[in-house]
Image (cartoon, rainbow, N blue to C red):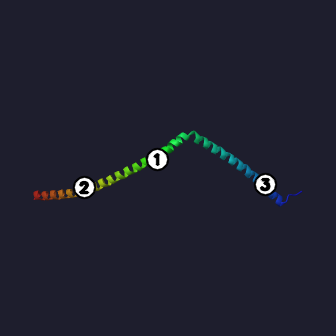
Amino acid sequence: MYISVENLFFIILSILGGTALVFLIIFLSKGIKFLQNLNSIIEKNEGNVTKVIDSLPEAAENIVNITDNVKNVSEAVNDVTEEVVETKDSLTEYLKIGKDIFAIVKDVFSK
């Protein structure tokens, strides 16, 4: 008695197909259990989920208000920064003038 290549190939394919079918059944079983657990968690927290979803528009409005406030503050900071730079420049000029005056007075009294 001998086994032909075709029969051997068919037996190997049958074993592989059966194994794949078993793995598919296990995978689907675990997937169904996961979905059932997920559904039970959602049902337990349905009130909380509804509460969060209902508060989302208010949270979005608050975010818009905060963004506007930050924009206004940044514009004010830019204005103040420009004024500080201008004041620094004018103070530097005044210090240079004072230094020159002091040098002139020093030269007058040192002679």
Residue at left offset 75%, top offset 54%: 17
Vertical order, 54 against 4 (above or below): above
Residue wearing tag 3: 14
Q: Nearer the viewer, residue 104 or 95?
A: 95
Residue wearing tag 2: 87
Residue 42, quarter of picture: top right
Residue at left offset 73%, top offset 52%: 20
Between label 1 and label 3, give the one nearer the viewer.
Answer: 1
SS at badge 2 = helix
Q: Which mark is residue 57?
A: 1
Q: Amino acid at mark 2?
A: Thr
Residue 33 shown left or right of residue 64 in the figure: right
SS at badge 3 = helix
How far apart are the two marked residues, 2 and 3, measured between alpha carbons?
89 Å
Residue at left offset 52%, top offset 42%: 50
Query: Nearer the N terminus, badge 1 or badge 3?
Result: 3
Q: Are marks 1 and 3 in contact (CB under 8 Å)?
A: no
Residue 109 shown left or right of residue 20 in the figure: left
